[in-house]
Amino acid sequence: QVLLSSHIQDLISSSELMTIFNERPRQEEPDILALDKKGDLYIFELKRWNSHQENLLQVLRYGQLYGNSNYDELNEMFKKYQKNKDFNSELYEIHQKYFDLADSSRLKKEDFNSKQHFLVVTNGLDQKTVEAIVHWKKNGLNIDAIVYWVFEISGEYFIEFNMYSPLEGYLEYESNT
């Protein structure tokens, strides 16, 4: 979770992201919340094991809980995330600096969280989950999976992420094995 939230912009190739929140222990919260340049909210659910359909329900549940969050609520979450850092800035100010936006391009508070994107990060996908993601994407839901693999070479551990590969191709591959 720390690795992903610290390097989230390296993992999402289609847009740059800024982490605004990490899950706290024993709370019903998404693992990571991030914003893109337009203020869209990205909701991440991380799993240490192969994906199950229930993971999609969990990330969608977080969409119910946080999808209607207004700027002030997001700002409060951001301040909790930043609590160990010496800082007093508002989310919109940090967002403007992070994305290098001119004053005229800075987002208004009402522009934050107008759209949500759901991402399940997992160590493999089962066919039912892939089929569900394909179904929801065809029906306009911004949902996707990021698959990772952990492997060892000469005593060192490495992690590889497969970003946004066409899920339909994954289905064909899985059904032929």
Image: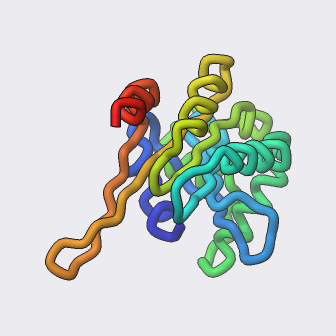
Q: How many marks?
A: 0
In depth, the one of 20 and 116 nearer the eye is 116
Q: Which residue is at 74% across, 50% downward? A: 58
In depth, the one of 83 and 68 nearer the eye is 68
Q: Against 3, is 104 above or below?
A: above
Q: Is residue 83 visible?
A: yes
Q: How is the image coloured?
A: rainbow
Q: Which residue is at 64% across, 65% downward? A: 22
Q: Is residue 44 left or right of residue 145?
A: right
Q: Is residue 104 visible?
A: no
Q: Against 81, is 98 above or below?
A: above
Q: Residue 36 occupies which quadrant of the picture? A: top right
Where is residue 157? Give x, y as percent. Answer: 28, 74
Q: Which residue is at 73% across, 39% downward? A: 113
In depth, the one of 149 and 15 nearer the eye is 149
Q: Is residue 99 left or right of residue 131?
A: left
Q: Which residue is at 70% across, 32% downward? A: 115
Where is residue 15? Give x, y as percent. Answer: 46, 37
Q: Residue 47 occupies which quadrant of the picture? A: bottom right
Q: Against 138, is 173 above or below?
A: below
Where is residue 66? Give x, y as percent. Answer: 80, 48
Task: Tell me the quadrant of the picture where the C terminus can be found.
Answer: top left
Where is residue 32? Give x, y as percent. Answer: 62, 58
